[in-house]
Amino acid sequence: MQRSLTILRERSSPEADPVALALAALGWIVADPTRAERLLALTGLTPEALRSGLGDPAVLAAVLEFLVAHEPDLIAAAAAIGTTPESLARAAQRLGP
């Protein structure tokens, strides 16, 4: 009797990729103009720097740290993108210096 083995792979999740989490969080942030303006004001980023820094871990960490610093937004962003506040905080740490 031949037995078949099934290899189970972990499903891809945004938590496994801090860049994906940061980009999803950024999408949530910029969907609200007031929140987007607050992000720029508090991080010191310009719209141009934000656009050009989408692949820069430091810029993405700044986006997540912006959320971590304001718990109501952190909780709302996590719910909106289907993750947990803790996952966003961990992603910020992984991207940061």
Image: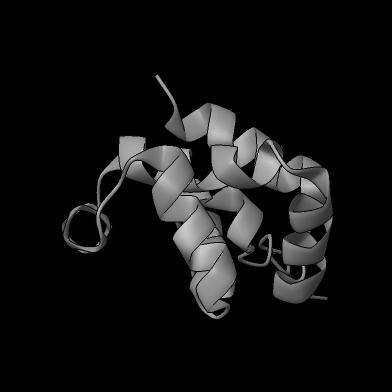
Quadrant of the image for the N terminus? bottom right
Q: Is residue 10 above or below residue 32?
A: above
Q: Considering depth in this image, is 39 or 78 the residue closer to the camera?
A: 39
Q: Is residue 8 visible?
A: yes
- Along the viewing direction, whichever of 83 and 66 lies nearer the viewer: 66
Number of residue marks: 0
Using residue 97 as the reference point, say whether residue 89 is left or right of it.
Answer: right
Q: Quick check: 10 left or right of 45? A: right
Quarter holding the C terminus is top left
Residue 72 drawn above or below residue 13: above
Outermost residue, top direction?
97
Where's residue 91, x and y in %? Answer: 58, 40
Residue 40 x %, y % = 40, 52
Tell me what residue is drawn at x 68 percent, y 36 percent. Answer: 69
Taking the image as shown, residue 95 lies to the left or right of residue 79, namely left
- Quarter assignment of residue 80: bottom right
Please report the residue visible at 61 percent of the width from the left and 66 percent of the height from the top.
12
Residue in front for this viewpoint, 64 or 86? 64
Find residue 58 and report its image quarter.
top left
Q: Find residue 65 and report its horizontal and vertical position in percent.
A: 57, 37
* Image quadrant in which you'd find residue 86: top right
The residue at the far bottom in this view is 31
Q: Is residue 3 visible?
A: no
What colour scheme was applied to this rendering of the protein? one colour
Q: Position of residue 72 (x, y in %)?
A: 83, 53
Image position of 49 (left or right of 43): left
Q: Residue at x 17, y 61 (%)?
A: 48
Say which residue appears at 73% left-offset and 43% top-offset: 70
